[in-house]
């Protein structure tokens, strides 16, 4: 089965700093999703990547999928307290379902 | 973007009672809905996949008689936790996808269940 490993598990940064979260798959990714979740709430869809080398940006968040399609990174530039939360990567399996990483908890200190 | 709602957002019930959780896609037709369970500081665990008009497909280890899923229309799926026990206390999240939205899943806000 496809497994997603996220690193780091948690991250504390000072407001204004940049940060990167990684998501590594044991198998080739056919669809990689990034979500943000606030504790006790639902998931907010951020971005979807499908092609090797693809990169997408939304406001100050950029996500990339490597050429081999086994690793994705989420980069936040000039972090703000509003970026705090849990970031989850998810991937489609060939069974038409999704599998998720364990999440990265981001704390942004003002 | 697509909106998925869940009701109730929180529910407290006594052990032995049944609880129904609703998941609705508000602005799109959801051909497929998924039910997840999330434990504290853990990722989502898929419980079952629900396709409109057909029986749900349960993941291994999930009791279908305990977690009844009904997907009666393209905008509504329900999860009923029957004879709930304290160990069923958890955060339940649904997601939906379908139509022009492609394969992206859109998630509901979740339902926190506490069984006393």
Image (spheres, coloured by chain):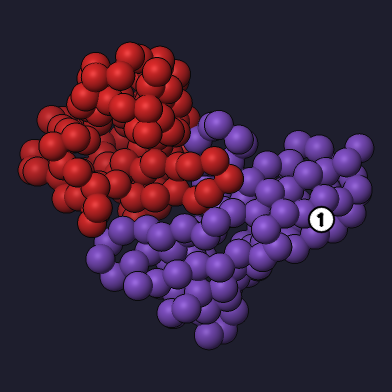
Give the chain letter for red: B
Confirm whether residue A51 shows in the render.
no
Residue A94 left/right relative to A48: left
Say whether residue A9 is left or right of residue A94.
right
Side of A54 where A79 appears, left or right: right
Which residue is at 72% across, 54% downward? A10
Protein chain holding label 1: A
Percent coordinates x, y for residue A58 in the rendering: 66, 51
Letter of the chain in purple = A
Depth check: give the residue in front, B32 or A23. Answer: A23
Residue B10 place in picture, x, y as percent: 44, 18
Q: Residue at (52%, 60%) from the top-left corner?
A: A101
- Mark 1 highlights which residue? A77
Residue sitting at the far bottom: A68
Of residues A26 and B53, the one drawn nearer to the viewer in this rendering: A26
- Circle 1 SS class: loop
Residue B2 image-quadrant placement = top left
Q: Residue B16: image x %, image y %? A: 24, 19
């Amino acid at each position: 089965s496809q497994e997603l490993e996220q690193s780091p598990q948690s991250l504390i940064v000072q407001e204004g700093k940049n940060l990167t979260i990684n998501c590594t798959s044991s198998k080739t990714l056919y669809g990689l999703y990034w979500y943000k979740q606030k504790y006790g709430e639902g998931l907010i869809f951020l971005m979807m990547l499908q092609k090797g080398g693809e990169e997408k940006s939304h406001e100050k968040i950029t996500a990339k999928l490597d050429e081999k399609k086994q690793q994705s990174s989420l980069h936040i530039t000039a972090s703000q307290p509003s970026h705090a939360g849990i970031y989850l990567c998810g991937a489609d399996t060939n069974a038409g379902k999704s599998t998720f990483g364990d999440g990265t908890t981001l704390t942004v200190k003002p | 973007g697509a909106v998925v709602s869940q009701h109730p957002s929180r529910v407290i019930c006594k052990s032995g009672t049944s609880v129904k959780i609703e998941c609705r896609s508000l602005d799109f037709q959801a051909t497929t809905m998924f039910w997840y369970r999330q434990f504290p500081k853990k990722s989502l665990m898929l419980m079952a996949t629900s396709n409109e008009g057909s029986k749900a497909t349960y993941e291994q280890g999930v009791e279908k008689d305990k977690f009844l899923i009904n997907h009666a229309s393209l905008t509504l799926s329900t999860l009923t936790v029957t004879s709930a026990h304290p160990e069923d206390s958890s955060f339940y999240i649904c997601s939906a996808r379908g139509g022009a939205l492609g394969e992206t899943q859109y998630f509901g806000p979740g339902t926190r269940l506490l069984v006393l």
